[in-house]
Amino acid sequence: MADLTLYTHPQSRGRIVRWMLEEVGTPYETEIVPYDQMKSERYLAVNPMGKVPAIRHGEHVVTECAAICAYLADAFPQAGLGPRDDEKADYYRWLFYAAGPVEAAVSNKAMGWEPTPERERMFGYGNFDRVVAVLDELFSLRDYVCGDRFTGADVYLGSQIMFPLQFGQLPERDSLLRYRDRLQGRDAYKRAAERDDEAQQQMQPAQSQPAQPQPAQS
Ligand SMILES: N[C@@H](CCC(=O)N[C@@H](CS)C(=O)NCC(=O)O)C(=O)O
């Protein structure tokens, strides 16, 4: 029995962590948590937020996709997914940028809401267009978060770009499409997607529920 368990749902951000686990290449078990059981006492004991994904590694539980990606890169250094010393600045900078400003900007916009120009200064992301422009410039100048080498930060930032592109929540800038294509060409990405697609097919319709924010209807 592996001492690493992924708690996930195939229609969720759990896909990010599945991809990271496939990049790491270590054995793990999967426990699918249906949406109607995420607030069960049993699962709240794993993640008191009642959300997936989470991992259990030995005695440790880690939640939050970005933290899980960083944790796995550290815990399995042989996979080479953590930053070298000269990559740390970019790695941490853009990992946290993805988990904070990018996620907030995209999800607020997808819900049909943006701060007014007078209130932008109160929001960590300022405004959606600026976040897009920063990402566009970043990937116009480099192939991966840390330059020319793929790391765990690409699993997370890449996912924060790929999911919104898929749902029409980010503009299709050439730089972002090229980055997406590089990431989606990876064997580990394809393996992870196959496993989640299979898990999805095996679920009863009642257990399956899209978790992506849907654009507000006007
Ligand atoms: N900040 C968390 C977000 C996790 C999250 O919102 N997961 C959604 C699925 S994508 C969920 O579990 N929703 C179920 C619920 O809130 O009841 C992370 O990055 O892991």
Image: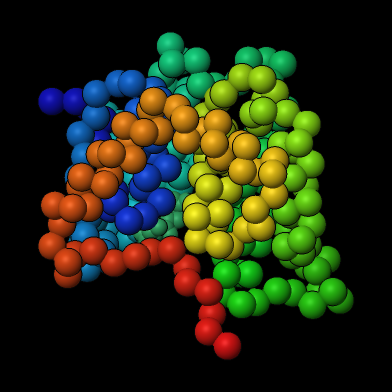
Q: How is the image coloured?
A: rainbow
Find residue 65 and report its horizontal and vertical position in percent. 46, 44
Quadrant showing the N terminus? top left
Residue for point 21% across, 39% down:
30
Residue for point 65% across, 53% down:
172
- Of residue 108 and residue 216, the one placed in the foreground of this image is 216
In this orientation, does residue 11 appear? yes
- Of residue 72 and residue 140, the one placed in the foreground of this image is 140
Residue for point 67% across, 28% down:
143
Residue for point 28% across, 53% down:
9
Side (left or right) of 3 relative to 191: left
Q: Name, please, the residue furthest toward the top.
A: 78
Side (left or right) of 165 relative to 137: left
In this orientation, does residue 45 appear? no
Q: Quadrant of ligand 1?
A: bottom left
Location of residue 101 with respect to 143 vertically, above or below: below
Side (left or right) of 117 relative to 14: right
